[in-house]
Image: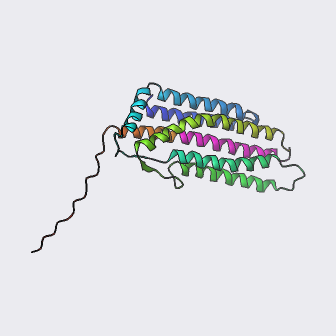
Amino acid sequence: MDITITLEELEKTFNSFFDKISSEETEKYSEYVSSEFKAYSDIIREFFTGKENEIKNIYSYIRNKEFPYNKIKSPDIVKSRHMYIEYLTGMTKYMVKMTELQSTDDVDKEKLCDNISKIKDRDNQFVTSIFGGDENPPIDEDLDSSMKNIEVLIDTNSDFNVFKTDITNLINKYNSSSELYKPVVSKGVMVYINSIRFYIYSCIKSILNCYMCIQNSLQHRTPVNPPKETPQYQMF
């Protein structure tokens, strides 16, 4: 599949499932997220179908140290993933703690809503920043490092299952949460799910863009930088 069509399909999938989730009850979020993750897996598989020899050739170039001076500009997507997993761990703890609030707890619901709104705003900024923003800007990488970015897809597929489990567990906790705080907890669950969704979308998009840059880079061989000439001075 053409990269442009794939990126369009990726964005369409992200937006369509956002609309579905936003219009449904919290209990159905897990079902829609599972369907969305499957759609992403299908997009990835369709894009790379037929590219087996192309990828095999790229690894051959790396082993044989061909194209050693070609540079591909991309954020370090391996780093992006590690940063998000660490970030999500803290977010999960906060959301779980929120689901455990009891009617006897003296917690201001308006203040809790305000905190969730702040988390939502910061979350969008953070995910954007780790995929080419201030937290993880694009750098010039060699072919080997760039292919490690593509290999994050392997981790992403396994992450789908972990994320689905985390979301299901949080929804189960929401179902048994205090009726007093349930409306607020529902907003928190939505923020949590959309954080994961936006991360997955941004990660796949960055990987596909990186692969496109690799393809473009291999259209020419960057020569070694010629040594700078030492100025010659003559006495006269």
Q: Where 40 sits versus 107, above or below?
A: above
Q: Nearer the viewer, residue 136 or 1?
A: 136
Tag count = 0
Is 59 on the left or on the right of 14, as rendered? left
Q: Is residue 190 magenta?
A: yes
Is 179 on the left or on the right of 82, as rendered? right
Residue at x 63% of width, y 46% of height? 85
Q: Position of residue 8 (x, y in %)?
A: 49, 34
Residue at x 59% of width, y 34% of height? 157
Q: Quadrant of residue 118?
A: bottom right
Is 206 on the left or on the right of 18, as rendered? left
Q: Position of residue 226 (x, y in %)?
A: 25, 53
Q: Which residues are magenta?
A: 179-203
Viewport quadrant of the N terminus: top left
Q: Nearer the viewer, residue 175 or 184?
A: 175
Q: Position of residue 227 (x, y in %)?
A: 25, 55
Secondary structure, magenta segment, majority class = helix
Residue at x 50% of width, y 26% of height? 46
Q: Position of residue 176 (x, y in %)?
A: 84, 39
Viewport quadrant of the C terminus: bottom left
List the single residue furthest toward the left.
236
Q: Nearer the viewer, residue 180 or 203?
A: 203
List the single residue furthest toward the bottom.
236
Q: Quadrant of residue 144?
A: top left
Q: Is residue 31 magenta?
A: no
Residue 15 visible, this angle: yes
List the single residue furthest toward the top.
50
Residue at x 58% of width, y 37% of height? 156
List the single residue furthest toward the right.
104
Residue 184 visible, this angle: no
